[in-house]
Structures are given as C-alpha cells and as structure tokens.
Amino acid sequence: MATVTLSNVVKRFGAFEVVHGANIDIKDGEFVVFVGPSGCGKSTLLRMIAGLEDISGGEIAIGGKLVNDVEPADRGIAMVFQSYALYPHMSVEQNLSFGLRMTGNPKADTDRRVKRAAEILRISELMDRRPKKLSGGQRQRVAIGRAIVREPQVFLFDEPLSNLDAELRVQMRVEISRLHKELGATMIYVTHDQTEAMTLADRIVVLRAGHIEQIGRPLDLYDDPDNLFVAGFVGSPKMNFIKAQIVGRDAHGVVVELAGQEKTRITQPLAGAAPEAGSKVIVGVRPEHFGSAGEGDTDLVVAIDVVEHLGGTSFLYARTAHGEDVVIQRDAAKVPTTSEVTVSIRKSYLFDEKGLRLR
Amino acid sequence: MRNRNATAYRFLAPYLLIFSVFWVWPIISSFMISFQATRTVPWRFAPGFNWGRLIGDPAFFNALKNTLLILVIQVPVMIALAMVMAVLLNSPLLKARGLYRFAFFAPVVVGEVAYSAVFRLMFSLDFGIVNKLLNSIGLPKIDWFSNVTPAMALIMIAVTWRWAGYNAIILLAGMQSIPEDVYEAATLDRVSKLKQFFHITLPLLKPVIVFCLVLSIIGTMQLFTEPFLITERGGPGGGTETLGLLLYRQGFRSLNFGYASAVAYTMAALAIAITLVQLWLTREKQ
C-alpha cells in the first residue's frame, strides 16, 4: 500500500497539451476514481502513473518516492486493462503466473500467490482454460487476478468494466468494492460512467479537457458541486439547468427570476458577493428537488412530454413555459395524469454565466 | 433455391470451362502421362517405365538432394531473417518506415531475368562487387559459378534476397495485429523485451509463421529461375540442379513428357507431405 501524489503533472502530445497541470494527493489505501467524458485525459493520467506514458512536466510520487524516471515494472503498481490484455495463448494459470515465472520468482511463492488470487476471485476451477474459452466476466477476473499476484502497492484500473453487459457490470462493481476492502490496497480507477464512480470511490476526481474540475467524496460532489460541469456530470438523470437572472437581494439571500417567467422567483442563500441585478445566471435543480405545488419558494407550470416508470420512482420529461427541458423525479404513486403539472423548486444551485458555482 | 443455384452456375460456366480445360485436365492428363512411355511413337502404357526409372535415377536423387538442401538451409534462414526485418520495421524508433517497407518488398516485383543478371554480375569472379569486397577485407576471391558449394550458397543467397522482404511484410502484418496492451501488461509484469519476443510475439505469430513456411516450402519445391538463370541450368555439372530444373530438362529439352510428369507428381507429393508434417508439428495443442 502507498500514497500517490501528482504535482503539476502535464502531458503533451507534440505541441498539443492534453493534461494541464494535475495536482492530486491519494492517500494510502484510498479508492480514487478518475471520471470524465471521453478525451478528458483520465486514461492518460492513469498511464502516466503506470509509467506507460512519459510525463511532459511535473512530478509523480508513489509511496513518497519520485517515479518520473522509474520503469513501469519498478513502480510497485499493477494495472487492469479495459481490453483485459490477457495472453491469449496461455491458460488462466499461466496468465496469472507469467510475470512471476519470467522474473525468476521461487515456484512455491508463485504457486501460493496464484492460488490465493484464484481463491479471492473464485476462478480456481478455470485454471486450465484459455482466455477465449472464458466469458467476459471471467476474463475480467483473470485480469484482476494477474494484478493481485503481483502484490502491488497500487492497483490501477483502466475502464475495466466497459466491455461487460449491464448486469455483469453491476456484479463486478460489487466484486471490485469487496476486493478493495479485502486487500486494503490503494486503488485508482478510471471510468466515464459516473454511476461506477459514485458507487466505488472514496473520492472522485472529475476531469474535463485535461483540467481537474473538482476532487471530493461522491456525495460531496453530488450535494456541493463547484461548477456547472460537475453538477451536470454527477447524478443520473443529470441536474436540470434553467436560465435565470438576478433581480435583487433580500434578507435570505439573492433573488433570482427564471427566464421568460416574470413571477417565478426563488431566493438563494449566498454567503459571497452577489452579482449585480440583471446579471444572467443559471439555476440548477436536481430531478428529486422538484416538489409538489407550494412546497418551495415558487411554483412552476411545466408541460409533460414523456413519463418513464421505473417501479417505485418515475421520471417526468417536461418543458417549462420558456421551452427548457426538465426532468422531474416523482414517486410512482404521485405521477400526474394531466398534460401539465405545477411543481415547486425545493432546493437549487446557482451558477454564474461562466458556469462557476455562486455560494 | 434450385433456380438461383442454376443461374449462379450459368454465370460461373465460362470460368469453370476454362478452369477445367487449362487446369483440371492438365492435372489429370499429366498423371496419366506419367504412366506412359513417351519416348516411343506411339506412346504406350507402361506403369513402371517412368516411376521405375525415378527410383533408380541418380539425376533425380541429385536434384532431390539439392532441392531438400535448399529447403532445409535457406527456408529457416530466410524466415529468421524476415522475422528480424519485421521486428525492425515494427520498431517505434524507426524513421521513414514506409520507405523501408517498400525497399524490403521491392525485390519481389523486380523481373526475374533482370535480378538474375544483376546477381551474375555481382558475383562474377573478376568483376563482381562481392569478390572485390571479400578481397578488400583480406579474404580470397570465390569462384561462385564453378564450384558446387559456392554455387549452392549463391542460389540460397539470391532466393533469400528475393523473398525475405516479402515474408517480412507478412510477418509484420501479423505482429501489428497483436494488441499493444498485451505488451504493456507484460512490461508491467517485469518481462524483458527479449522474453516478450520469445514468450508473446513468437507464440502469437505461430499461424503466420506456419503460413510463411508453407508458402516457402511450396516455392522451394518448385525452384527453377535461380538455378536456371544464375548458375546456368543447374551448373556446375548439375550441382545446383533442382527438381524443377530436372522436370524442365526432361520435359522440354529431352521431350520425355512421361518422366517429367512423374517428377512433377513427386514434387507435388513431397510438398504436400512436408507441409502436412509441418502443420502437424505446429498444430494448436488443446
């Protein structure tokens, strides 16, 4: 187990900079997830920690030791690849033991490690099979097993569940969580799936276009996003954004009027300086923060387009009078049968025109 | 469905007709001719005439020995060389990759007569650049065309020059189909580049290597151009005569079609037998 520290880490491909000075402190035994849309630099960051990509600037330390110029094999890390990267011509047992055999590790120790990994991942009965005879989930277990036998200080996972079907993904997510508890190792996990990030992580690093947007515990990101991007990325269905403008300030905070709806005003507590009256802002409302009429500051009439029934919960896909799409979460028993419904905003977030949170 | 099949066969008919007349019939015909004494007029059926002669013919065994010698020495050397070339071509450090690929592949498209003429010049006793180079490093000149061992070596060098690049390109295509992350996983497993080559690249390339070997075996069994043009009809004194050349000499110089057909069938049978053994030895073990 070890800490991982990234200080001003930069990555350039030619003149093109893809990671712009990343600073991350990962604690010993922590499970950190890098999440962001495709091309945000999360995999590049992981590969730089692994040593599979050179670092263009900054420093990376593992276990307090600077590893910028240390070979990947000497960094004390193990990596699980998206494509599994199993050796197709070797059996499961050979896949697990290959690295140890090639480096002259004593046979008894190799056997012990392979047996332990197989038991942890419940693949003992698959040891003689080749990868092509395994299902996707079994291959993923073997790939994780290959990382376990190395007994690394840090586990790196590069979108390990992307190639699995939805049901297996949920199952493997639980397995990885269990594995983290069992091994207690530092784990860094890359995904574009915010659900994976929310369910697995001790802390999440949200990335966009090579910049770190926010680092925090899953519920902190959900409840207290720093900006519009994080607010929209974390949570499913995503947060609704409604255009608005500042109309003044009262004792409770800043008063905001939703665009195109003169009488729809909400008061937002604000500790910092409020933008001038007339400034354009964005109000963010999570689907579950729409209440029934009268429950919040103001009521809002929306036209329902589609209702999605998920059992206990339903989602109303609707439009405001100003034409903005919103998703509203309702208990299945409280789904309206009319084409219009009046809702209130129980809780909201305020963002300035640049997308930064106004607190 | 039957109608649709009939229409398809009608479209195929012109090709099938030409294929039957110029491919299938000669194969059957030459097999029948191999059982006939063709140096008498009219030809007569004599099963033991050609096949019997084959068993005791020193010229046949000389050609067989030469062909197998080339097969055993040249083919493995060429495939090994092609592998080295493919590894170099696959290196991320290599600049002007496209130029090298073209250069390695170019010998295949050079005309056989032109390349043979250039080889004769290069290896000429008095004017050849090869002997000049040997001299310049203090080694004696070699008479490549008058002694059997150098002549055989020359044939092997020429064939290797012509086909190594071709095989390298095929091996390179195979190498590039091996996913990069398999190597990255091995790198993280502390496996050295050399061990990665022997334990990952070679086993995963096995089907491609077998393909190259089979093509090369078939090619060598038919070897004709180089001993015909470079060492002047299998010279010196039949020292580089191959089965292909023997077939040509018997069939088209002595007009002994029966015996030439028997040689042709022997060549085909040997190529099939060697290839089958090869495939059996390199089969995927479950």
Image (spheres, grey):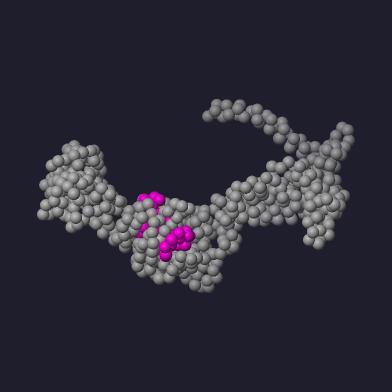
Which residue is located at x 25 percent, y 48 percent?
A353
Pick the front one: A315 or A73 = A73
Q: Does the image show residue A196?
A: no
Q: Is residue B65 left or right of residue A202?
A: right
| Residue A44 on the magenta segment | yes
* Start-end of magenta stretch: A33-60
Measuring from the top left, give residue A25's x and y in whole percent: 35, 65
- Relative placement, left or right, of A344 versus A109 is left
Residue at the image position 29 percent from the left and 61 percent from the top? A217
Residue B11 x/y as whole percent: 60, 27
Compared with B116, B93 (above or below) is: below
The residue sitting at the right extreme is: B40
**In x, y percent, where is residue B68?**
76, 52
Q: Is residue A194 visible?
A: yes
Seen in the picture, residue B7 relative to A112 is either above or below; the reply is: above
Q: Specify the quadrant that holds the C terminus of chain B.
A: bottom right
What's the residue at 66%, 31% (across, down)?
Answer: B16
Residue under the point 78% across and 56% down: B133
Query: From the viewer's perspective, is B161 left or right of A178?
Result: right
Residue A97 colored in magenta in the image = no
**Viewer-closest of A335 and A189:** A189
Total labels drawn: 0
Depth check, front residue: A210 or A139: A210
Residue furthest front in the image: A276
Residue B193 coordinates in the image, percent (x, y): 57, 62
